[in-house]
Image (cartoon, grey):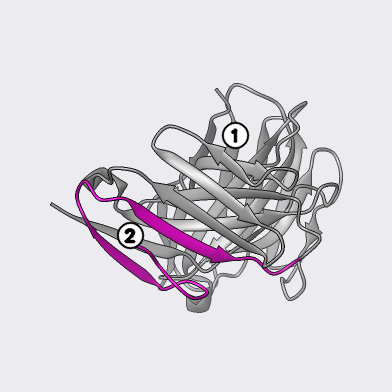
Amino acid sequence: GAVVSQHPSWVICKSGTSVKIECRSLDFQATTMFWYRQFPKQSLMLMATSNEGSKATYEQGVEKDKFLINHASLTLSTLTVTSAHPEDSSFYICSARVLGRSDYGYTFGSGTRLTVV
Amino acid sequence: GESVGLHLPTLSVQEGDNSIINCAYSNSASDYFIWYKQESGKGPQFIIDIRSNMDKRQGQRVTVLLNKTVKHLSLQIAATQPGDSAVYFCAENIDGNAGKSTFGDGTTLTVKP
């Protein structure tokens, strides 16, 4: 149980365009989802926390207008990278907190490799 | 094989040996810790967790040890197999802090057949 499905698994886009990444909780309701970014051979860095029905909370240094997060339902959160540039190329990973569980967000999506050319 | 110091970026062990991966966490207020395994191109996979009211927890072939005095966490893998080759991250959490995890730098484990 507690599976998070993330799509797409990889995407290549042109500089200046926007890309949407989806994360769905398949067999549970996720009140909270976390979005991470991971550069090659580096650790995961938390970008933002999204809560169903409310605005996302962004970590320091993460541009809210560039990384738009929507968590409109208990099973879906989306991250849109707007006006993407090559420096946004990275591995984006979502994580979901399982409703009613005492442990925190340890269910991760499979990640999205974004390449901006 | 064992990673020493804060943590080495890589650890190479022989198949069948035991592995010890170390992690120094930063926040003395952290009270929940998780070890993850990440294979190339995939998201992290939960391995084992431990709360701060414990100092040891065992799973299948894995043991996590927590030393709060020196803010140190270790993951022991028994009878390491080639399928264990991956990057291992520790993550620390603070109860009530919205479940946010802070990840360590990671250790790459390579198992030689």
Q: Residue at x 77, y 26 (%)?
A: A100
Nearer to the camera, A109 or B81? B81
Q: Which quadrant holds the N terminus of chain A? A: top right
**Membership of A1 in magenta stretch:** no
- Image quadrant where one finds the C terminus of chain A: bottom left
* Vertical relation: A24 (above or below) B91: above
Residue B109 appears left or right of A110 = left
- Element at badge 1? strand
Residue drawn at 22 percent across, 47 percent down: B82
User: Front-most of A111 and B6?
Assistant: B6
- The chain identifier of the residue carrying mark 2 reads B
Quick check: A58 left or right of B82?
A: right
Three-letter amino acid code at the position of disc 2: Leu
Q: Is residue A31 above or below residue B51?
A: above
Identify which amino acid the numbered label 1 is placed on: Arg
Q: Is residue B96 visible?
A: yes
Residue B35's disc is none
Q: Secondary structure at mark 2?
A: strand
Q: Position of residue B44 (x, y in %)?
A: 48, 48
Residue that mark 1 sits on:
A24
The picture places residue B30, in percent across and down from the top left corner, at 76, 57
Which residue is label 2 attached to?
Answer: B109
